Image (cartoon, rainbow, N blue to C red):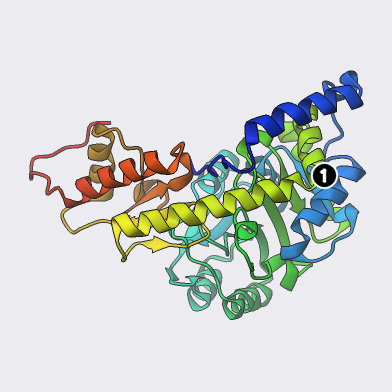
Amino acid sequence: MNLPPIPQDPPLQRIIQNDLATILKQQDLNSLMSYRVTGGTVAERQLGAKWIEPVIGPRRTDEILVSPGAQSALAAIVSTHTQPGDIIVTDRIAYPGIRTIAAQFGLMLVGVDSDAEGMMPDQLDRVCSEHHPRLLYCIPTIHNPTTATMSLQRRKDILAVAQHHHLTIAEDDPYSLLMENPLPALAALDHGRVSYIATLAKTLSPGLRTAYVALPNPDMTRRVTAAIRALALTNAGLLSALAARWMQTGQAQAILHGIQKELRLRQSVARRILGDGHCQNPDGPHVWLKLPDWWGSADFVAYARRRGLALVPSTVFTISGEPPQRARIALGSAPDVASLEESLHGVLSVLQHKRSPGFTDIV
């Protein structure tokens, strides 16, 4: 799993223990352990709006929702904009969560080719002309798994194609706040076309089960709220209270800075051990590992698993066409840098190993 590393500074375990104790002293237990308002309270939405403001700009509270994780928010947005049989266009190599949602709702995915900056506008235009999709799903910043980040001009070009084809966009943005100077989100450049999702799972902790959603207008907020209620009902009260306290006290920023520092260190370690030629972003949590000619992705991952190494093959991410000779490494899953170094040396050893022609997958 693509997890943020648990920072050593600030000490996360002690922070959680102290803050939960304070919350239990200051807030009513019945309220914390009961069902919550779907979409979050006004105060929680205001905190969410402030958290994502550096990337999308100021938003009204009635355009913001708090969701129990990004996946439920994405499912709610997709279900609001589509009907069974509709087409969603996305990157040809894409986050697998959109595949599970499409399968669940009876939707078809069509992939678009990418370059070093991500989805190519001319290819998106071609796919839209041929297939007439209802929705575009994308990760413009530190794409999962390719790490590609759209330039400002690329973002404008993608939006121009979407406008031409009257295409609605679901923007998944788990990683922008890991960057020191993130580019404006698509939602900041085209307020009325883009539904935006920013999870805390990659910037603070997946254990919070919290994502912030920015919608184009209050009507869409009401529709997506109803979809979240149908899919996941509500957030967990205790976790929502912890996330809110971190936002109010500034602790969230301190934890984010600790994670940023740790990820930059881990990316430098990965580059030192694995060398250049792989897709990396110095602020990101993963590496898109390039494999030598003698390794197919599935074979490589299966062989690495025998050595105690858990990677993700490119087949998991491939929407259409041949899977590339790549595998994803999640740098945050190692408990510390020493463990990461040991694991990466193991990956390097597997990379250099030339398998015998008779090797078969064992999964």
Rendered-image quadrant of the C terminus: top left
Residue 35's x, y, as percent? 84, 25
Badge 1 element: helix
Residue 272 position, x and y percent, is 33, 59
Image quarter for residue 359?
top left
Bin the neighbour count of mark 1 within 10 Å (Cα to Cα): few under 14, some 14-19, many 20 and up: few
Q: Which residue is mark 1?
A: 249
Is residue 324 visible to the viewer in this orientation of the structure? no
In the depicted view, which residue is nearer to us: 162 or 329? 329
Mark 1 residue type: Thr
Q: Position of residue 99 (x, y in %)?
A: 51, 46
Residue 65 horizontal side relative to residue 350, left or right: right
Q: Residue at x 63, y 40 (%)?
A: 205
> Could you tell me which residue is drawn at 75 percent across and 51 percent down?
213
Is 353 in front, or is 269? 269
| Count of picture labels | 1
Left or right: where does residue 342 sit relative to residue 233?
left
Give the quadrant of residue 26.
top right
Q: Residue furthest left?
A: 357
Judge by depth and name the residue closer to the eye, 78 or 176: 176
User: Which of 172 and 113 lies nearest the eye of the viewer?
Assistant: 172
Q: Position of residue 108 (x, y in %)?
A: 52, 52
Is any part of residue 206 visible from this angle? yes
Who's the residue at 64% across and 31% down the image? 13
Vertical relation: 30 (above or below) 59: above
Image-quadrant location for residue 33: top right
